[in-house]
Image: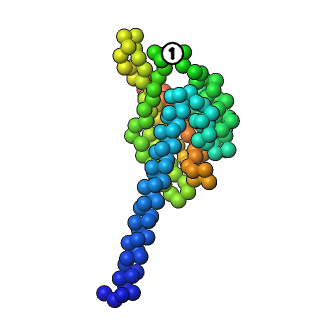
Amino acid sequence: MADDAKIEALQALVDDMQKRLKLAEDREAIWRLVMAMQSAIDGRDIRAYAEGFTEDGVWAGVVGRGVGPKGVEEILGKYMKPWESHSTRTWHTTLDFVVDVDGDTATSTSKFQHITHDEKGELRVWHLGAYDDRLVRTPAGWKFTRRNAYVIVPYMEPKFQLVD
């Protein structure tokens, strides 16, 4: 193999590795955003949750629709009050996370479940839901442009849960 051909082959390999590394870094950054959002909701830091949205980003779910960080904070703030006590709070986990990155935009889907205590203090899964997300890379990192949140169990038709 001629030196020029070897150099071209090595450059192609390096380019492919850089592309795959960038994809892995983007997926990790989006996963970390989702985890930060989960922690913000669990801690009832609605402002921090809302900061995960672009200025025109939309959160839509059974409780309403908010546009931009202020709108998201307003709609979720109506329903997500500070916990009365540790025994009445919930935690949620994010499951089955899938993310597809296309340059500076991405989509992701995942499921969530809320876990709480029952009357005996034992764990109880309160409900199972799903997220359908659209994201964009910003100078401040990845942010949501759309987050649809809806309940799967108990079953409710998603189209009736998403307020547009």
Examine the rendered structure and indicate whether residue 122 appears above or below residue 129: above
Examine the rendered structure and indicate whether residue 47 appears above or below residue 19: above
Q: Residue at x 62, y 40 (%)?
A: 51
68 sits left or right of 125 in the view: right
Report the colour scheme. rainbow
113 sits left or right of 40 in the view: left
| Foreground of the two, 121 or 145 | 121
Judging from the image, what secondary structure is the residue with disc 1 in?
A: loop
Residue 87 in the image: state x and y as whole percent: 46, 15
Res. 108 visible in picture: no
Residue 26 in the image: state x and y as whole percent: 48, 54
On-image quarter of the C terminus: top right
Residue 149 in the image: state x and y as whole percent: 52, 34
Examine the rendered structure and indicate whether residue 120 appears above or below residue 66: above
Residue 89 in the image: state x and y as whole percent: 49, 20
The residue that mark 1 highlights is 85
| Foreground of the two, 77 or 145 | 77
Mark 1, other Cα within 10 Å: few <14 / some 14–19 / many ≥20 = few
Residue with the most extreme left position: 1
Q: Residue at x 46, y 35 (%)?
A: 130
Check disc 1 and give the amino acid type: Ser
Res. 43 visible in picture: yes
Residue with the most extreme top position: 119
45 sits left or right of 68 in the view: left
| Foreground of the two, 35 or 54 | 35
